[in-house]
Amino acid sequence: MKSALLILGIAFAMISCNKNEQKSENFKTAYIDTAELLKEYEKFKVEYDTFKVKSEEMGRPLESKFRAFENEAKNFQTNARVKGQAWAQQKGAELQQREQQLGVEQNALIQQLQEEGAQLRDSIIKDVRQYIKDYGKKEGYDYIYGTGDAATVLYAKDSYDITKTLLEKLNKEYEASKGTETKEVKKEEVKK
């Protein structure tokens, strides 16, 4: 009797393994080196080169101001000896104020360029992700993984997405842990 149960158990386990093997053979997966993809993507190269030219053009007026400031600072040292200490103090204060203004302009330009560069990159990445998703659907992939700078799943069939289920559970757990605090805050908001 025990040996019959043991044989039956082994047979059941083998059948289960065969079913799992058959299922896994049906999965179609691939991966993409996302860093290499962006590096070699022509649209990204062209957009980056265009952005680089735009950055240089936007920086030229500021470079001119810095060169003029440097020349004025050199002349200041020469003229300070000739025109006296009072003139040197006044002109030194003016130069210091101009230097601060140039620093502010430079920081604003850098921030603007960083924001525009990030928007450009994000836009291209969004388009590439959509293309990968469409390609995955068209070619029948179950998963397309990403490696490189950002190792993520770039495409998966909707039936494998448990995001909503997990989010609902997490939100319920969070609300439960907050307990009466949430109810009290909502009551106060209603009173207002």
Image: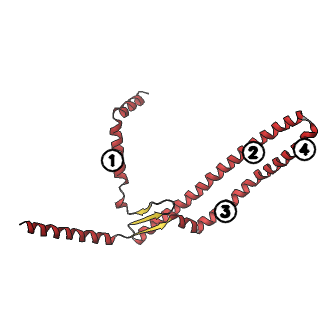
The residue that disc 2 covers is 102
Q: Nearer the viewer, residue 52 or 192?
A: 52
Give the amino acid type for the residue marked by disc 3 in the picture.
Thr
Question: Counting other residues with Cα less than 10 Å from the Cα at mark 3, is it few (<14), some (14-19), or many (20 or more)?
Answer: few
**Residue 75 horizontal/vertical position (percent):** 88, 45
Of labels 2 and 3, earlier in sequence is 3
Tags 2 and 4 in contact by the CB under 8 Å rule? no
**Residue 22 horizontal/vertical position (percent):** 28, 72
Measuring 76% from the left and 55% from the top, which residue is drawn there?
60
Front label number (2 vs 1): 2
Identify the image quadrant of the N terminus. Answer: bottom left
Is 176 located above or below residue 128 in the figure? above
Measuring 27% from the left and 68% from the top, which residue is drawn there?
20
Mark carried by residue 169: 1
Give the amino acid type for the residue marked by disc 4 in the picture.
Thr
Measuring 49% from the left and 59% from the top, which residue is drawn there?
150
CA–CA distance in space, label 2 to label 4: 23 Å
The number of numbered discs placed on residues in the rendered structure image is 4
Question: Which SS class for mark 4?
Answer: helix
Question: Which SS class for mark 2?
Answer: helix
